[in-house]
Image (tube, rainbow, N blue to C red):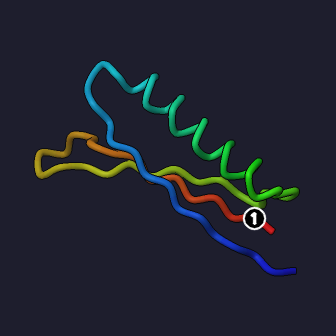
């Protein structure tokens, strides 16, 4: 079994989070479809913040075979 990891990122703007998360889901799902990935092992999200602690972005990591 060979595990591979792909990282995706997206900026987060106030009042647009739902759209941006939907867009990120679309990009990840398209990557899975385009690469004929049959087994996803894990998906993990982490937020990024600015100096004031406000969320400014999201990092999504997908581990797959």
Q: Position of residue 57 (x, y in %)?
A: 33, 45
Residue farthest along the top direction in this orientation: 15
- Is residue 63 shown above or below 53? below
| Left or right, 19 with reference to 64 | left
| Left or right, 41 with reference to 13 | right
Quadrant of the image occupied by residue 14: top left
Residue farthest along the front direction in this orientation: 34
Q: Position of residue 7 (x, y in %)?
A: 52, 61
Task: Give the residue at x 67% y 44%.
Answer: 30
Q: Residues within 10 Å of mark 1 (few under 14, many from 20)?
A: some
Q: Position of residue 20 (x, y in %)?
A: 43, 31
| Left or right, 25 with reference to 18 | right
Residue farthest along the left direction in this orientation: 52
**Which of 19/48 is in front?**
19
Dividing the image into 4 quarters, which one contains the C terminus?
A: bottom right
- Is residue 58 shown above or below 61? above
In the structure shown, which secondary structural element does the residue marked by tag 1 occupy?
Answer: strand
The total of numbered circles placed on residues is 1
| Left or right, 15 with reference to 65 | left
Tag 1 residue? 64
Q: Position of residue 54 (x, y in %)?
A: 21, 40
- Is residue 32 shown above or below 6? above
Quadrant of the image occupied by residue 5: bottom right
- Is residue 8 shown above or below 25? below
Quadrant of the image occupied by residue 18: top left
Task: Give the residue at x 75% y 76%.
Answer: 3
């Amino acid at each position: 079994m060979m595990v591979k990891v792909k990282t995706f990122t997206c900026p987060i703007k106030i009042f647009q989070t739902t759209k941006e998360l939907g867009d990120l889901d679309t990009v990840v799902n398209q990557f899975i479809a385009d690469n004929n990935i049959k087994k996803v092992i894990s998906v993990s999200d982490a937020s990024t913040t600015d100096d004031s602690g406000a969320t400014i972005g999201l990092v999504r990591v997908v581990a797959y075979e």
